[in-house]
Image: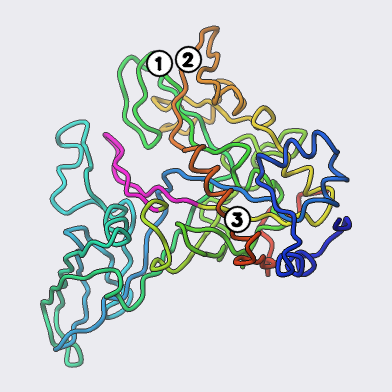
Amino acid sequence: MAKAGKTIQEINARIKAGRAVVVTAEEMIGIVEQEGAAAAARQVDVVTTGTFSPMCSSGAFLNLGHGKPKIRANRVWINNVPAYGGVAAVDVYLGATELCEDDPQNKIYPGAFNYGGGHVLHDLLAGKKVHVYMESYGTSCYPARVAEKEMALEDFRNAILCNPRNCYQNYNCAINMSEKTIYTYMGVLRPGGGNVSYCSAGQLSPLLNDPYYQTIGLGTKIFLGGGIGYVTWYGTQHDPTVERGANGVVQGGAGTLFVMGDLKQMRPEWLVGVSILGYGCSLAVGIGVPIPIINEQMARFTAVKDDDILAPVVDYSYDYPMATGRVIRRVSYGELKSGTVEIDGRQVPTTPLSSYSKAKEIAETLKQWILAGDFTLTEAQMKLPGSELLA
């Protein structure tokens, strides 16, 4: 049995020797309840987490490769979806939310948004070829003004998934208190508070199992899109100062992760193009983070339960767009996953945008990778802002 106060190096040695004890965050709840956090810390080496949901701040750097003659591709379309060419000659960034050039958007309301950047990435992973069209103003060193070709994923010299804001640590629950249906990035919200939409795996979500970012930071190796990726910085809009409960868990959207990985390693079932009615396009991303149980405190953190995680219910018809900061009430993920929550004395149905079954599959897959010795842990080279808040 591993001793308390383990180091990541010691845990990796146990993984390589085939002696590591690895459990999912869901399994850790029962272990801590039955044996206590101190005993769990001695017994368990790694807890695996997972989440699968739309994550709009996603995309990929793609190197298109040169033809003859060469081109400085300052305007690029991939399957008629614009990619940003202001990087270098044939380096582009394709954003997950970028729309197909001829999409009617919300001119026909609510718009269907059938195809965008996230769909292009999914098509590439699914083995489909995409049409690349490039335009340039022409230079002495890059004389071509137009180029086009069909490309499969393997034809790109580089394809790097680069997501500036993923894996939100908790988030709003959306409701619509107006008298008409509204269409949001949280899905369709029926009038008169007809439904509550939420988007988190709750007790399986990575940053909810490391609420003060004690093990997750710059350089953390993760499951990303079915392959291996890394946390490369804290994500945009990262805000560790959000109100926390007595258990240290944030009670609204707080920490985020900037993640990257080789797109060519990834799989289409874990990076899926998403169409959000009346709103736009996105990319559903699968992420799993291993959490080393280096002490009793981390054992306690990774035993967090849905009933102990609270999220704010916010009116997306007025309070969210007008940034009033008003919260109707806070509800637990236990309530949300039950199918209804109480709002103003009545039971309102809940609708998840995040797949808990997929989150479980990610956590279990990562667990099996570690048990097989195919995945070892990395030590964060820099902690995320907010790690200093832990007393």
Residue 280 is inside the magenta segment: yes
Residues at marks 3 and 2, CA–CA distance in whole angstroms: 38 Å
Residue 190 is inside the magenta segment: no
Residue matched to label 1:
194
Please tell me which of labels 3 and 1 falls first in the chain: 1
Residues at marks 3 and 1, CA–CA distance in whole angstroms: 41 Å
Which mark, residue 348? 2
Q: Are marks 1 and 2 in contact (CB under 8 Å)?
A: yes
Q: Main secondary structure of the magenta part?
A: strand
Q: Which residues are magenta?
A: 271-286
* Label 3 crowd bin: few (<14), some (14–19), many (20+), radius 10 Å: some
Camera-nearest residue between 34 and 383: 34
Please tell me which of labels 1 and 2 falls first in the chain: 1
* Label 1 crowd bin: few (<14), some (14–19), many (20+), radius 10 Å: some
The amino acid marked with disc number 1 is Gly
**In this view, 129 is above or below 281:** below
Residue matched to label 3:
368
